[in-house]
Amino acid sequence: MDFDLDAYLGRIGYTGDRTPTAATLAALQRAHIQGIPFENLDPVRGVIPALDLGALMAKLVHDTTRGGYCYEHNTLYAAALRALGYRVTLLTGRVLVGAKPGDLRPRTHMLLLAEAPGDPRRYLTDVGFGSEGALLDPMPLAEGEVGDDPRRHRLAVTPADSPLEQWVLRAFLDGEWRDQYSFTVEPFYGPDFAVINFFMAGNPRSPFGSRVYACRTLPDRLLKLDARTFTVSHADGTSVKRELADDAEVRTVLAEEFGIVAPEALKEA
């Protein structure tokens, strides 16, 4: 197995308890989100990201100048949780951010359910959403609200033409509750994500290949780069946007603000 738990924990700066509990799970999720940035530079330059653990360890752990997108983050995170003794189920979600009423989007997001020994609850845990609506702490799979400071989230069961319950994750943003993604608890597996990953990274219509996108979550602020728009959002709700002049400035911001060294071959932002 090409997974080194100690190296992974060192990369995310985690030095706490390794007992598989709800508290450990929460600490690990925050550490991962704050330790490894979200970025799509491989799809932008026409490269399909590899999802085998050896490749993920090389890119996200041993190379401290890169990050990845949801399949990379959550595949690596799932391996760490299993190594620590959690039971993990891989799930897929339909991203609802920006969706219009009646839109039916494909399942393209990877998320996880984690179970700790002796704990009857199942937890939604996700380190790969890469947006201001992302979940900072795990949530029990139950209807209700949690305050994952400085954010707030809700889980709800919504009507669906399916024998399985459809869950929706909502985030409180700009004074209102906004849908982030929907999912069911049907298990998915590595080969399923290999297909989804290939489509999302290689299809010319995919948003991941059309423009540079990066997100870095820090304890007091969120950094986001979308094409040439750089946004810093603070915990108090204020934000500052800056339009970058050219590809050189994009590379500078990626390096200085996100800790990401962009590969040479990048399309125009």
Image: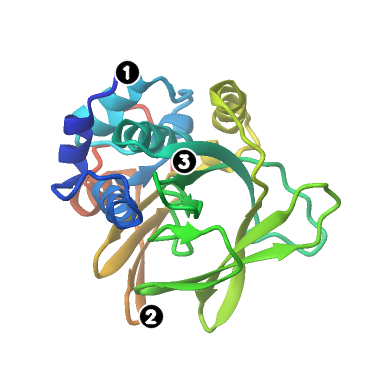
Image quadrant where one finds the N terminus: top left
Q: Residue at x 22, y 25 (%)?
A: 4
197 sits to left or right of 55 = right
207 sits to left or right of 118 = right
Within the image, what quadrant is residue 251 found in?
top left
Residue 164 in view (yes/no): yes
Name the N-terminal-most of marks 2 and 3.
3
Instruction: Report the coloring of the rendering.
Output: rainbow
Q: Which residue is mark 3?
A: 70
Three-letter code, disc 1:
Gly
Q: Which mark is residue 54?
A: 1
10 Å neighbourhood of mark 2: few (<14), some, or many (≥20)?
few
Q: Residue at x 20, y 39 (%)?
A: 9
Residue 236 in the image, given as x and y percentages of width and height: 33, 82
Within the image, what quadrant is residue 72 found in?
top left
Residue 184 in the image, given as x and y percentages of width and height: 67, 47
Q: Residue at x 45, y 49 (%)?
A: 126
Position above or below: 154 against 252: below
Q: Which residue is mark 2?
A: 237
Position above or below: 231 against 198: below
Outermost residue, front side: 118
Name the N-terminal-most of marks 3 and 1.
1
Three-letter code, disc 3:
Cys
114 and 42: which is toward the camera: 114
Q: Secondary structure at mark 3?
A: helix
